[in-house]
Image (spheres, rainbow, N blue to C red):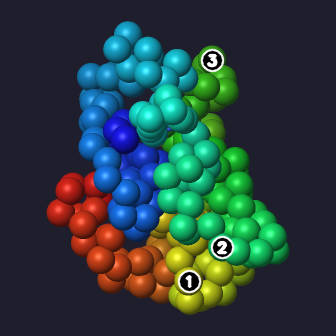
């Protein structure tokens, strides 16, 4: 498999999950500084011009939720309730918290005027803090579902890496801080550091 990756992005979640699964994969780094995500070569991989994308024996897979489910099936808990609770958090990360963060740099997706982009930026800290406060109540501890790592954990780790840059102090959310600290002790996280993903 080949993961199309850019540092500091949501592609970190896929890299962490693949490593936690013990999957073999190579990486193609997409250079955002030169707008590599919009190059013809990359658009041929992912017409949306976003990372991550995962090249698999079956073809290209996009969207973090889908990539995590395919690439790290051992991190899906047995039992419909636990799996649904995991996806409840993942869906919130994908559709609410990631979108709130994107309003800082990507206002042009939602409005034409630069003044509107500036206005949107003023709400990023507040919205990310609200999202963190919500997540804080959803973490059983140390991981989202308790003692066992699930797909929600690398996802939550990647998204909460943005909090500080968005003006939100992680220390104000002890369960998030504890989850991040626990995840950082994992062998897979050490491997992620060695390979330059985090
Ligand atoms: N729904 C997608 C969103 C992917 C996404 O928006 N990725 C951002 C990086 S965090 C990106 O590639 N942005 C490039 C751009 O907007 O030009 C997912 O969850 O995988």
In the rendered image, which residue does mark 3 sit on? 112
Disc nearest the viewer among 3 and 2: 2
Q: Label 1: how many residues lie within 10 Å, few (<14), some (14-19) or many (20+)?
A: few
Residue furthest toward the top?
A: 40
Determine whether label 1 and label 2 are within 8 Å by CB: yes
At 58% from the left edge and 40% from the top edge, which residue is drawn?
63
Q: Quadrant of residue 6?
A: top left
Q: Quadrant of the C terminus?
A: bottom left
Q: Is residue 152 above or below residue 127?
A: below
At 71% from the left edge and 80% from the top edge, which residue is drawn?
137
At 62% from the left edge and 67% from the top edge, which residue is drawn?
76
Q: Secondary structure at mark 2?
A: loop
In the rendered image, which residue does mark 2 sit on? 77
Cα distance between the residues tagged 3 and 1: 45 Å
- Disc 1 under 8 Å from ligand 1? The reply is no
Q: Tell me which numbered mark, 3 or 2, is placed earlier along the sequence.
A: 2
Q: Tell me which numbered mark, 1 or 2, is placed earlier along the sequence.
A: 2
Q: Tell me which numbered mark, 3 or 1, is placed earlier along the sequence.
A: 3
Q: Quadrant of the N terminus?
A: top left
Q: How far across and how far down the image is residue 44, in percent?
A: 44, 15
Q: Quadrant of residue 111?
A: top right
At 37% from the left edge and 57% from the top edge, which residue is drawn?
23
Q: Secondary structure at mark 3?
A: loop
Residue furthest toward the front?
A: 57
Q: Is residue 193 above or below residue 137?
A: above
Q: Is residue 180 above or below residue 40?
A: below
Q: Nearer the viewer, residue 4 or 23?
A: 23
In the rendered image, which residue does mark 1 sit on? 148
Residue furthest toward the left?
A: 194
- In the rendered structure, the answer to whether residue 58 lies left or right of residue 77 reads left
Q: How far across and how far down the image is residue 109, in percent?
A: 61, 25
């Amino acid at each position: 498999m080949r993961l199309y990756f850019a540092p500091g992005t949501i592609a970190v979640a896929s890299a962490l999950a693949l490593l936690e699964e013990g999957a073999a994969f190579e990486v193609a780094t997409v250079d955002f500084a030169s707008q590599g995500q919009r190059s013809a070569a990359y658009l041929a991989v992912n017409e949306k011009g976003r990372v991550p994308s995962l090249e698999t024996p079956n073809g290209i897979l996009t969207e973090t939720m889908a990539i995590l489910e395919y690439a790290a099936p051992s991190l899906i808990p047995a039992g419909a309730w636990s799996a649904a609770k995991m996806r409840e958090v993942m869906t919130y990360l994908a559709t609410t918290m990631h979108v709130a963060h994107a309003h800082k740099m990507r206002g042009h997706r939602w409005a034409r005027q630069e003044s509107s982009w500036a206005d949107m930026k003023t709400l990023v800290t507040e919205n990310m803090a609200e999202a963190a406060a919500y997540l804080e109540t959803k973490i059983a501890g140390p991981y989202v579902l308790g003692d066992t790592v699930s797909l929600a954990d690398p996802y939550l780790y990647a998204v909460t890496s943005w909090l500080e840059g968005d003006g939100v102090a992680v220390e104000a959310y002890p369960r998030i801080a504890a989850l991040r600290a626990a995840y950082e002790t994992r062998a897979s996280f050490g491997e992620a550091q060695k390979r330059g993903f985090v």
